[in-house]
Image: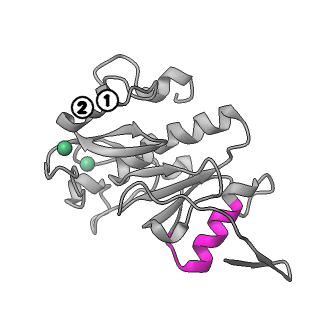
Amino acid sequence: MYVVGMGRKYIVTRDVQNAPAEKSVLLVGAVETEDEVDELTAAGYDVAEQLHYPVAIATHDGFNVRDFGAVVVYAPSMDSSTGTGTALILQAEAHAHGVPVITTQSATDCAPCGTCRQYQTVSTARDASGAVVCVACFGDAPGCACGMDGVTEPVFLNGAWDVQCRRCTTITKAAFPSPWNVERDDAAAPADLFGIRA
Ligand SMILES: [Zn+2]
Ligand SMILES: [Zn+2]
């Protein structure tokens, strides 16, 4: 593909990795160090939990952004002076191909859903009356791929967060053990294991 910027045209040729599921989002951010990859993976849990779509973690630039429903920019964005290559390339490609780009909002815009109290950190939506409404309470959550329409939760699988019902996550966690997958009833949420979430 072509990336046009700063008066120069680049041709980027590389192997690309497919999206983990038909409707997925790609989360881009700094991934130069192990800590940054952990932070981005932890953020991916929040994105999957709030948007209810599988979230691939862009640990490298070998993703075809056109396979994804949206690209979520955790940090840095193209505006950041500390931007790193992977995030910049994928965000530029998303813009070039008309793939929706969602930039995570500032902390001051975060708010709990008026119905279920789920804290909205990615993109807070409000109804006509100004009340915060999450994707699930809005009735827009796609549910689990198995057809169950009940409560879902993110589960880490092959470098991405999938969104599954309670029954499917139990099976996935047993079949694909990962330090990111712990029982939600435990005192620590998955990301707390890495000391990343407050
Ligand atoms: Zn809600
Ligand atoms: Zn299921």
Query: Residue 17: where, in percent of width, then height?
Result: 54, 58
Assign the magenta stretch its main secondary structure: helix
Report if residue 134 is visible in the image: yes
Q: Which residues are magenta?
A: 88-100
Instruction: Residue type at mark 2: give it.
Output: Ile
Q: Which residue is mark 2?
A: 171
Q: Residue at x 52, y 28 (%)?
A: 198
Query: Which quadrant of the structure image shows residue 92?
Result: bottom right
Please determine whether, in this image, residue 95 is positioned above or below residue 151.
below
Which numbered tag is attached to residue 110? Answer: none
Please determine whether, in this image, residue 167 is positioned above or below residue 5.
above
Query: Residue 156: where, in percent of width, then height?
Result: 41, 37
Q: Would residue 91 be counted in the magenta stretch?
A: yes
Report if residue 77 is visible in the image: no
Element at badge 1?
Answer: helix
**Ligand 2 picture quarter:** top left
* Crowding near the residue tagged with mark 1, few <14, some 14–19, many ≥20 C-alpha atoms within 10 Å: few
Q: Which residue is mark 1?
A: 175
Q: Is residue 34 left or right of residue 16?
A: right
Q: Would residue 61 be counted in the magenta stretch?
A: no
Query: Residue 123: where, in percent of width, then height?
Result: 44, 57
Q: Residue at x 54, y 67 (%)?
A: 65
Query: Which quadrant of the structure image shows residue 126?
Result: bottom left
Instruction: Residue type at mark 1: give it.
Output: Ala
Q: Are marks 2 and 1 in contact (CB under 8 Å)?
A: yes
- Disc 1 Cβ-to-ligand 2 distance below 8 Å: no
Q: Residue at x 42, y 67 (%)?
A: 69
Instruction: State the residue in front, 164 or 192.
Output: 164
Which quarter of the figure is the N terminus placed in? bottom right
Report the label total. 2
* Crowding near the residue tagged with mark 2, few <14, some 14–19, many ≥20 C-alpha atoms within 10 Å: few
Please determine whether, in this image, residue 94 is positioned above or below residue 110.
below
